[in-house]
Image (cartoon, helix red, strand yellow):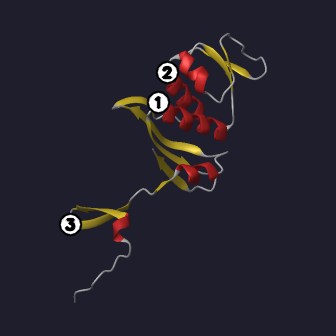
């Protein structure tokens, strides 16, 4: 007896046939920048973060917001960072002074921000430098969100 199988929203899946079996894989649904700004990311974990510019990888597989941001800053001239950043910088080693951390990769000290403030700076620098980002975050609720620009 033949049985018809109805799958609603099939366009939400990619399809593969493996050993005669139909495999359906949910497609990633990307959120907008405005949606990302409204999400509480305080305890969110980076699952995937790839940043590239003109086919060249700027940052790949980093799991902390700060290390992703430092990778972006390393690709930029110091003057461009200082003119466009939302962070506080000093050109000298100010380790331990008023929350400053020395970053030898960029030869400057900067004051840390929380995850939300750091992600905001990442987006700011990506726009400024015409970079692209593919980001997946696992939220505190275990929901995984995807963002691309």
Q: Are marks 1 and 3 in contact (CB under 8 Å)?
A: no
Q: Position of residue 19 (x, y in %)?
A: 21, 62
Residue 39 visible in the displayed image: no
Q: Nearer the viewer, residue 72 or 124?
A: 124
The disc at residue 20 is: 3
Relative to 26, does residue 111 appear above or below in the rendering? Answer: above
Residue 137 visible in the displayed image: yes
Extreme-top residue of the structure:
92
The disc at residue 93 is: none
Crowdedness of circle 2 by 10 Å Cα count: few (<14), some, many (20+)? Answer: some
- Residue corresponding to mark 2: 76
- Residue corresponding to mark 1: 129
Q: Position of residue 83 (x, y in %)?
A: 60, 22
Q: Residue at x 40, y 33 (%)?
A: 52
Mark with earlier residue (1, 2): 2
Crowdedness of circle 1 by 10 Å Cα count: few (<14), some, many (20+)? Answer: few
Q: Residue at x 56, y 16 (%)?
A: 79
Q: Nearer the viewer, residue 105 or 140?
A: 105
Crowdedness of circle 3 by 10 Å Cα count: few (<14), some, many (20+)? Answer: few
**Element under disc 2:** loop
Q: Position of residue 147 (x, y in %)?
A: 49, 48
Left or right: 139 as drawn, with respect to 30: right
């Amino acid at each position: 007896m033949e049985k018809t199988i109805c799958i609603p929203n099939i366009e939400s899946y990619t399809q593969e046939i493996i050993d005669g079996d139909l495999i359906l894989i949910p497609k990633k649904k990307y959120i907008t920048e405005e949606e990302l700004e409204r999400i509480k990311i305080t305890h969110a974990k980076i699952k995937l973060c790839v940043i590239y510019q003109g086919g060249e990888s700027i940052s790949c597989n980093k799991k902390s917001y700060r290390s992703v941001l430092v990778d972006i800053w390393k690709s930029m001239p110091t003057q461009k960072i200082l003119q466009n950043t939302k962070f506080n910088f000093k050109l000298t080693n100010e380790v331990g002074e008023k929350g400053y951390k020395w970053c030898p990769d960029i030869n400057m000290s900067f004051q840390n921000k929380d995850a939300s403030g750091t992600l905001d700076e990442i987006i700011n620098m990506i726009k400024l430098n015409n970079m692209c980002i593919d980001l997946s975050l696992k939220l505190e609720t275990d929901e995984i969100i995807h963002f691309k620009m």
